[in-house]
Amino acid sequence: MAVYTCPRVFTSSSSSYCCRHHPDLATRRAAADKPGPRPRFAAGRVDATAPFHGLSSLILRFPPNFVRQLSTKARRNCSNIGVAQIVAASWSNKDSDLSAVPAASAVDAAATAADLVVPPQIGAEDDLAATAAIAASSAAVDDAAVFGNGVQFGGLPDLKDASFLSSDGSIAIHAGERLGRGIVTDAITTPVVNTSAYFFKKTADLLDFKEKRATSFEYGRYGNPTTVVLEEKISALEGAESTLMLASGMCASTVLLMALVPAGGHIVTTTDCYRKTRIFIETILPKMGITATIIDPADVGALETALDENKVSLFFTESPTNPFLRCVDIQLVSDLCHRKGALVCIDGTFATPINQKALALGADLVVHSATKYLAGHNDVLAGCISGSMKLVSEIRILHHILGGALNPNAAYLIIRGMKTLHIRVQQQNSTALGMAKILEAHPKVAHVYYPGLPNHPEHELAKRQMTGFGGVVSFEIDGDLKRTIKFIDALKIPYIAPSFGGCESIVDQPAIMSYWDLSQSDRLKYGIKDNLVRFSFGLEDFKDLKDDILQALEKI
């Protein structure tokens, strides 16, 4: 069991440290010594009346400046020993009555542990200071472990002699874990649970789980505590009943399409979208007998025709779209599709839940590449699907079969990234809008695509259904392929890379980055001109970005 607590012992204003009995602890100790049954734990917290197992009722008091007086070496060795080792040193693994171990033994054991690790070159004064600090930490740990001051535990096991472990190899594998372990539940940050499987204490527990009398995690592909925290966070932000995290945005889109569209079904999607999504719809889904109608994002008439002429299962679109940032009237298309029994899924990656609430506007599901704004630091791949419990559960069943589970370390990075999501998105909204206006007025820029500009075809719609217009601006240089390359290569701040939504600005030329395998004429079928630039604005200073873009334009 690993225990961490912030020591409460450096509170005395006296000039020297002393030992005293805490009256409250002594009272509780007396209560603990009374005969009769008593529960070990209550409501997941350590019970004050549990056996003490050698934990000290002493509190060591030090002057406030004691820590500052410790030498660098002494402080370092106190840190290296660690609270967990102090606790381990104060508990006996022998066949004995642990509750009878004298309080002083804990301090003595901690001091002994200090002797084992403090380097010999430390002077006597430093050694004394280190030992005193270790003993103080031990007392604080004892207090917290017994009375739950700031540390909560769930499922802490009885301290039994692990006599079935007869070798160092077995002990190294199982000690501190096989009989159960304390779970710290009051850490500010969410712990990362790195495990591929979860165990059951006995077969009866497994049967309760299988027969739905109890809930539990079972296998890493089916769920993870760290990932569940992230799913609940996104659900709250989107106003969804449930969220499913997957290994990437494309994983989310493809699993959703396969789970909700039956063999022989029909879907409707839009012309402007992420190319890999289009490839999947046009080349993979037909192998399952699934056909598609592709319409302009704003062509409501074409959507109505597709709904009338086909048994449409799903309308799947981005809003805003990639890379021209077209917007779909989510409320209108949701009404039209629902009348015909079709579901609506909006890929809101470019919008983020900060700028747009697709579910509140009527969509059944919303998808994000969490790689982008949600994580926000260009350091993780992930995707998510949010919506009703019924639909997400249906998708989750297929997800458990196909795999594509999110690594819990990635889940933690996204949790951490989302804590600054609203601040980042607000800054990126502001920078992108300001730069879009500057680019629109520049003589070397032929056209700007940004829903925040009045000349955007869905500007009024974007104002109605979005609170901000996003951090990506697409624009066309007044020139050809080579002149556009010259502009991009002259930029100093942004990275030439795919992706968007991170702290660092990123720029790319879609004709090269995403469509270079096609001929120029084939690229034009999708509206991709050689002079098109997609610029994802990061969190750099607005003036720095403006100056960089203007100097690059001056060089072409």
Image: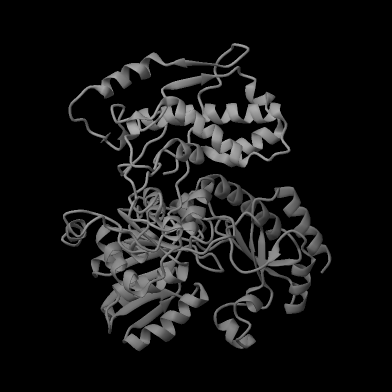
Quadrant including the C terminus:
bottom right
The answer to which quarter of the image holds residue 211 is bottom left
Number of numbered discs on residues: 0
Left/right placement of residue 340 relative to residue 538 reads left
Percent x, y of residue 269: 40, 74
Query: In the image, what residue occupies the spot 17% across and 27% down?
Result: 36
Q: Is residue 466 visible?
A: no
Can residue 165 be seen? Answer: yes
In the displayed structure image, the side of residue 213 where residue 3 appears, left or right? right
Depth check, front residue: 370 or 523: 370
Q: Is 69 above or below relative to 276?
A: above
Q: Is residue 489 above or below residue 118?
A: below
Which corner quadrant holds the N terminus? top left
Question: Where is residue 385 shown, x and y percent of the image?
Answer: 38, 62
Residue sticking out furthest to the top? 14
Question: Which of the 4 image quarters holds residue 480?
Answer: bottom right
Q: Is residue 295 above or below residue 431?
A: below
The residue lying toward the viewer, choosing from 165 and 411, is 165
Residue sitting at 77 percent across and 69 percent down? 489
Q: Nearer the viewer, residue 263 or 135?
A: 135
| 474 relative to 380 in the view: left or right | right
Q: Quadrant of residue 133?
A: top right
Position of 497 relative to 375 (above/below): below
- In the rendered image, the residue lying farthest to the front is 95
Residue drawn where x is 20% and y is 56% of the image: 205
Location of residue 28 in the rendering, given as x and y in whole percent from the top left corner: 31, 20
Position of residue 336 measured from the top left corner of the image (x, y, whole percent): 30, 66
What colour scheme governs how the chains and residues are painted in the rendered image of this protein? one colour
Q: Residue at coordinates 50% horizontally, 24% vertically from top-left?
A: 8
